[in-house]
Amino acid sequence: MPKGSVAVTAERCKGCGFCVEFCPTHVLELSSAFNAKGYHPPHMINAEKCSGCNLCGMYCPDFAIFGYRFPDAKGEKKEA
């Protein structure tokens, strides 16, 4: 089960690739589709590996991507 995901605002993206380059779990790649400005925004591959760390969002100069963690399921114990 994935621990997190990302939200992409494709129209803000300029296709710099920082999010893809700095993703520690390698779940992002630049899409072959274009946004309205003619850039290739990122999309998720291997979504089940996403940790929700938000490094993609921290490195994005255009605030076009945000990582987030899923809340823990009820009854699931956290490991110390």
Image (cartoon, rainbow, N blue to C red):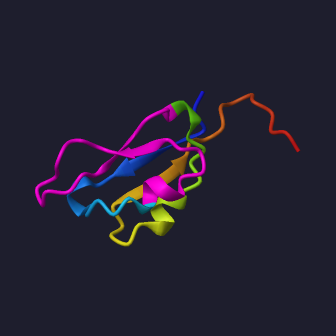
Quarter of the N terminus within the rendering: top right
Main secondary structure along the magenta-highlighted residues = loop
Q: Residue at x 19, y 43 (%)?
A: 33
Give, as a single range, the part of the protein colored magenta: 19-47
Q: Residue 62 at what x, y percent from top left?
A: 33, 70
- The residue located at (49%, 53%) in the rendering is 67
Q: Horizontally, is 2 left or right of 76 in the view?
A: left
Q: Residue 16: image x %, image y %?
A: 33, 63
Residue 70, quarter of picture: top right
- 53 or 72: nearer the eye? 53
Residue 52 place in picture, x, y as percent: 56, 48
Q: Is the residue 49 above or below the residue 42 in the image?
A: above
Give the residue displayed 54% in from the left and 31% down from the top.
48
Nearest to the observer: residue 53 or residue 71? 53
Question: Residue visible at 39% across and 45% down?
Answer: 29
Number of marks drawn: 0
Residue 41 colored in magenta in the image? yes
Furthest toward the right, the residue is 80
Residue 61 picture location, percent across and down:
38, 72
21 vs 9, left or right, is right
Residue 79's image quarter?
top right
Residue lying farthest to the bottom in this orientation: 61
Q: Quadrant of the C terminus?
A: top right
- Locate residue 28: give its quadrant: top left
Left/right of residue 9 with respect to residue 58 in the rendered view = left
